[in-house]
Amino acid sequence: MKVAILRFPGTNCEFDTQYAFEKLGYSTELVWHKQESLSKDFDLVVVPGGFSYGDYLRSGSIACFSPIMKAVSKYAKSGGKVLGICNGFQILTEVGLLPGALKRNNNLHFISKHQTLYVENNNNAFLNQCDKGEVLNIPIAHADGNYYIDDEGIKKLESNGQVLLRYCDKAGNRVMVNGSVASIAGICNEKKNVFGLMPHPERALESILGSEDGIKMLKGFKV
């Protein structure tokens, strides 16, 4: 399996992401944002975390105009799998591949900590190694992770099984972490080939660092 990992000016999680996928035995390639096309032999495209273009104007709002994002949109619309992590999630909403938007955290502070997550749906490539209702421990680190979508949008996400992860306590009860609608931490598109989440699974591969639960997520893409 071959994974493309995008790089924008300001991206800072590309090497962590590369380490994570290669640890799981995948082949990886870093792709600069000025590239206008993607190789057809990629099985997954990852838009990693970081601060693309310094998060000026709004997180992801400049990166969505980079040449590579036209190629990513074309790849996704033809059925290719795309995963956006943190800033990558923000970019995928800005470019329109995922519904909704990410706003400033409701407490206006940057949040960095381990956070428990409830697996809401596992009938997708991203979470098929997890049990529905399982509670995972994955780090979060963001200032703009407050997911928003209107009432009609949340009903559509719920009915289509597009809500993947919610913030929860250790018992699985929903908690409010950053103001996200319905405590949403991760979603997918209607076709279930584009995924976005604010937590960082690439930082949860080693028990010595607090959790190995990210392995289950990233292994789900194995083909």
Image: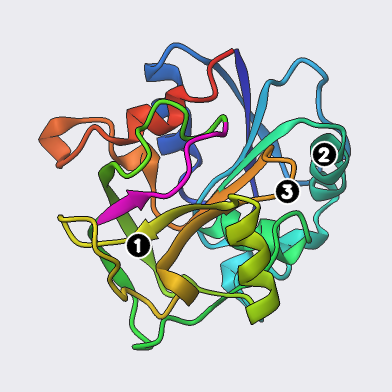
Q: Quadrant of the C terminus?
A: top right
Mark 1 highlights which residue? 141
Tell me which residue sits at (47%, 28%) in the image: 128
Q: Quick one: 181 or 7, which is closer to the camera?
A: 181
Mark 3 highlights which residue? 190
The magenta segment: 116-124
Tag 3: residue type? Answer: Glu
Q: Position of residue 147 (x, y in %)?
A: 53, 72
For the residues marked 1 and 3, what is the alpha-carbon distance in whole angstroms? 27 Å
For the residues marked 1 and 2, what is the alpha-carbon distance in whole angstroms? 28 Å
The quarter holding residue 130 reads top left
Task: Tell me if mark 1 has few (under 14), some (14-19) or many (20+) residues whose alpha carbon lies within 10 angstroms of its own.
Answer: some
Is 93 placed above or below 149 here?
Answer: above
Tell me which residue sits at (65%, 52%) in the image: 160
Is 10 placed above or below 111 here?
Answer: above
- Residue at disc 1, secondary structure: strand
Whether residue 47 sits left or right of residue 17 in the image: it is: right
Task: Tell me if mark 2 has few (under 14), some (14-19) or many (20+) residues whose alpha carbon lies within 10 angstroms of its own.
Answer: some
Residue 150 visible in the snapshot: no
Mark 2 highlights which residue? 35
- Residue at disc 3, secondary structure: loop
Tell me which residue sits at (63%, 80%) in the image: 151
- Which of discs 3 and 2 lies nearer the camera? The answer is 3
**Earlier-in-chain disc, 1 versus 2:** 2
Q: Are marks 1 and 2 in contact (CB under 8 Å)?
A: no
- Which of discs 1 and 3 lies nearer the camera? The answer is 3
Whether residue 39 sits left or right of residue 19 in the image: it is: right
- Residue at disc 2, secondary structure: loop
Tell me which residue sits at (19%, 62%) in the image: 169
Is 17 placed above or below 183 here?
Answer: above
Residue 168 is one of the magenta-drawn residues: no
